[in-house]
């Protein structure tokens, strides 16, 4: 009887281990750049190594490559077609609560690296930097989560 329990326990552990592997997080590399990285850079690009991943856990490995500027990465559900994220012109920032921000890195000093772990459902999202003026200068990326 004890041997059967040991075999059953081993089978359960193996099954759980396989299930864990099948649902491993997808990693997305995000680089936040500006002209301090390279003087030929125009605007403030957010360079994402992939713009589509399957639904589930996603790890965003974010690096601020700037030599002088603070950046950050925030995740928002994309607004419906033809609409924009709510924007405060005076502050030069997206209104985070009104835009339904899902997660963020917080402020990242030059050279800093952070990982954001989040479970995402199928749909369209926007990754943005919400430091004053950065979103309007191009520091954002569309991002799609598939089934």
Image (cartoon, rainbow, N blue to C red):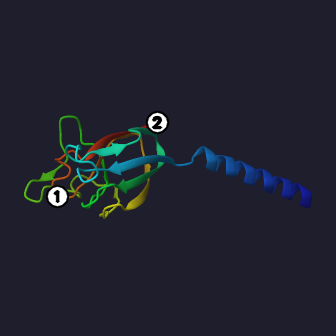
Q: Is residue 1 visible?
A: no
Q: Quadrant of residue 4?
A: bottom right
Q: Residue at 34% across / 58% down in the picture? A: 104
Q: Which residue is mark 2?
A: 147
| Residue 96: % across, % down | 23, 57
Q: Is residue 3 visible?
A: yes
116 displayed left or right of 38: right
* Element type at mark 1: loop
Q: Quadrant of residue 5?
A: bottom right
Camera-nearest label, 1 or 2: 1
| Residue 84: % across, % down | 18, 43
Q: Residue at 19% across / 45% down in the picture? A: 43
11 displayed left or right of 121: right
Contact, mark 1 vs mark 2 (Cβ under 8 Å):
no
Q: CA distance from mark 1 to mark 2?
A: 34 Å
Q: Which residue is mark 1?
A: 132
* Element type at mark 2: loop
- Which of these two is toward me, 90 or 102? 90
């Amino acid at each position: 009887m004890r041997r059967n329990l040991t075999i059953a326990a081993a089978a359960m552990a193996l099954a759980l281990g396989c299930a864990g592997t099948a649902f491993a997080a997808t990693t997305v590399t995000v680089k936040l750049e500006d002209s301090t990285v390279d003087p030929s850079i125009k605007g403030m690009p957010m360079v994402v190594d992939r713009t589509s991943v399957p639904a589930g856990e996603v790890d965003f490995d974010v690096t601020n490559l700037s030599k002088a500027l603070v950046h950050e990465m925030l995740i928002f559900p994309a607004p419906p077609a033809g609409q924009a994220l709510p924007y405060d012109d005076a502050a030069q920032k997206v209104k985070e609560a009104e835009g339904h921000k899902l997660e963020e890195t917080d402020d990242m000093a030059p050279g800093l690296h952070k990982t954001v772990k989040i479970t995402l459902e199928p749909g369209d999202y926007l990754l943005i930097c919400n430091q004053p003026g950065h979103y309007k200068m191009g520091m954002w990326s569309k991002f799609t989560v598939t089934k």
